Amino acid sequence: MFNASPSTIAVSAAGPVRAPKDLEGRRLVGHSSDVALRTFGVFCAATGIDRAKVAVGAFGGGFREQVEALHGASDLHGVFGYVSTIASAMAQGGPDGNGRLRHLRFADHAPDLYGSVIMASRRVLDADRSAVAGLVRAINRGVRDAVRNPEAGIDAVMRRAPYADRRAEMLRLKTTLAIEMAHPEGRRLGIGAIDPARFGRSIAQMAAAANLAASPSAAEVFTPEFLPPTGERVTSLAKG
């Protein structure tokens, strides 16, 4: 879905962390299942960070609470997350706090990494491939509709979750479209497809960071079989 990694490490704009190497000797936190936290090893390898010199912990609260804690803290220096998720959280429940943050974006430092994807179990693939194809078509239609009319997309979100903050959800959508989906590769391939060489490099980086005994091939992880034709998919929203 995302041709650029959505992961980031949010730090205080007024704090001491200005570049990745500044994270050494600091403490970062994130949800235990957070993608940025779990792929931090790739970020470290790409930026020359000594992973052993960075303390990483987990938290169970909301993003805004954790990110707000960065400001003026002596024992907390960064929060893992998605750029769009943190932007949305910082626009909820009070004044917009995004201007007080600096982002160390994985897309800038580990550009081979892709973002979120639709996963299917091998059991489902073996049992009902037509259902998987139908799901992908439906998601693709929803993405196209939301890109054409973001307000209608947020209308759908509010029907599903009427308690949501509409302004924050619109910011989340616009950030997703402008960052994660606005990659030049999408213009060439269409959103949903991959560059096999780039994807192979990302797998190798992940395998090395996780000390895997073997690295799977791109074909073992991804298939374009269920994608609609390129002309029916969203292409990159990048201006350049």
Image (cartoon, rainbow, N blue to C red):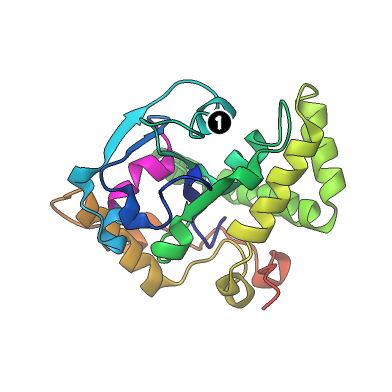
Q: Is residue 192 left or right of residue 216?
A: right
Q: Is residue 147 above or below residue 165?
A: below
Q: Is residue 183 visible?
A: yes
Instruction: Say which residue label 1 marks.
Output: 68
Q: Classify 10 Å Cα crowding around label 1: few (below 14), some (14-19), many (20 and above).
A: some
Check if residue 47 falls in the magenta segment: no
Residue plotted at (16% across, 50% down): 211
* x, y percent for residue 21: 31, 56
Q: Is residue 46 left or right of residue 104?
A: left
Magenta residue span: 33-41
| Amino acid type at mark 1 | Glu
Q: Main secondary structure of the magenta part?
A: helix
Outermost residue on the left side: it is: 213
* Placement of the N terminus among the 4 image quadrants: bottom right
Residue plotted at (75% across, 57% down): 144
* x, y percent for residue 164: 75, 27
Q: Secondary structure at mark 1?
A: helix
Q: Nearer the viewer, residue 22 or 92?
A: 22
